Image (tube, rainbow, N blue to C red):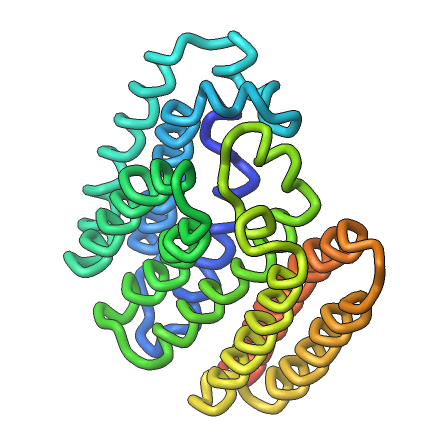
Amino acid sequence: MLALTKPRITAMTLIVAGVSMLLAPERIALLDAALVLLGIALLVSGSSALNMYLERDYDGLMDRTRDRPLPAGRMAAGWALLLGFLLSVAALPALYFGANALTLWLGISSLIAYVLIYTPMKRVSSFSLVVGAIPGAMPSLLGYTAALGAVDRIGMALFGLAFLWQLPHFIAISIFRRRDYTNAGYPVVAQIVGMQQSKNLIVLTSILLVANSFLLWIFQLGGLLYGVASVGLGGWFLYACCKGYFGKDDEAWAKQIFMHSLVYQSLLFGALLLDHCLRMYV
């Protein structure tokens, strides 16, 4: 049951949501913040379980997913459906009473987009990558609106940062796992547009990602420390993207971009939080 909730993804979304909550100009009570984070955890866990239920047959066709509980036969599919439904429903009052109606509706929209739009769309179009990045980035906006109660330019910049980060990250995955996805019938980017265009898209979306990171400094959410970090980390990430662009081993390059993207996101959000805390409390 724990595996159905994709706990590592849930933990990552809680970190992003928690940081976004702290960056909001309005403070939120500790108990309310805990209730909101619980609601986000339930929402992400529930949508993950529903996703695994809907993709159980296809997961059995891929090496990286065939050992999940449903395709491996360790759990009946009905239990996954029930768990996903109960967790998703339980998330809604937590978001409403811990935060506000806006956060609730954003959470509902995220759930619908992930389970009812993105999951079936993966079978028919590689554009599902962009659609799936919307609910993937929603925890940053949920955390922000839980504290502020509104969407402003800073909230959208945080959402944009989380949204754009997913594009080079998952295009890289589509390159080094394209055979696995193709065998399961998923039309991933690397298969549909070809290797060269996929590499072009990684570089282009990485440039957009780094440019978006500067918006938080322009909007004065981050100070000098964040500004220096965003320039340094952005330059490092773009260098990694361009370094192997003309190489021959595309899969090795894509794996490197995948790992670099994880480090980039972690350090950038860490620098943003540290900068905010130093300016607020020191």
- In the image, taking residue 175 as reference, residue 53 lies left or right, namely left
Q: Nearer the viewer, residue 81 or 152?
A: 81
Question: How many numbered circles does the render carry?
Answer: 0
- 117 relative to 268, above or below: above
- Residue 138, image x and y in percent? 36, 57
The structure residue drawn at horizontal position 43% and vertical position 66%, both measured from the top left corner, is 20
Residue 242, quarter of picture = bottom right
Picture quarter with the C terminus: bottom right
Is residue 281 visible in the rendered image? The answer is: no
- 180 relative to 261, above or below: above
Residue 158, quarter of picture = bottom left
- Residue 83, image x and y in percent? 34, 22
- In the image, taking residue 37 as reference, residue 9 lies left or right, namely right
- 139 relative to 27, above or below: above
Direction right: furthest residue: 248
Q: Nearer the viewer, residue 11 or 121?
A: 121
The structure residue drawn at horizontal position 39% and vertical position 65%, both measured from the top left corner, is 21
Direction left: furthest residue: 101
- In the image, taking residue 184 as reference, residue 52 lies left or right, namely left
Is residue 144 visible in the rendered image? The answer is: yes
Residue 120, quarter of picture = top left
- 40 relative to 231, above or below: above
The structure residue drawn at horizontal position 46% and vertical position 49%, both measured from the top left corner, is 126
The structure residue drawn at horizontal position 34% and vertical position 66%, both measured from the top left corner, is 144
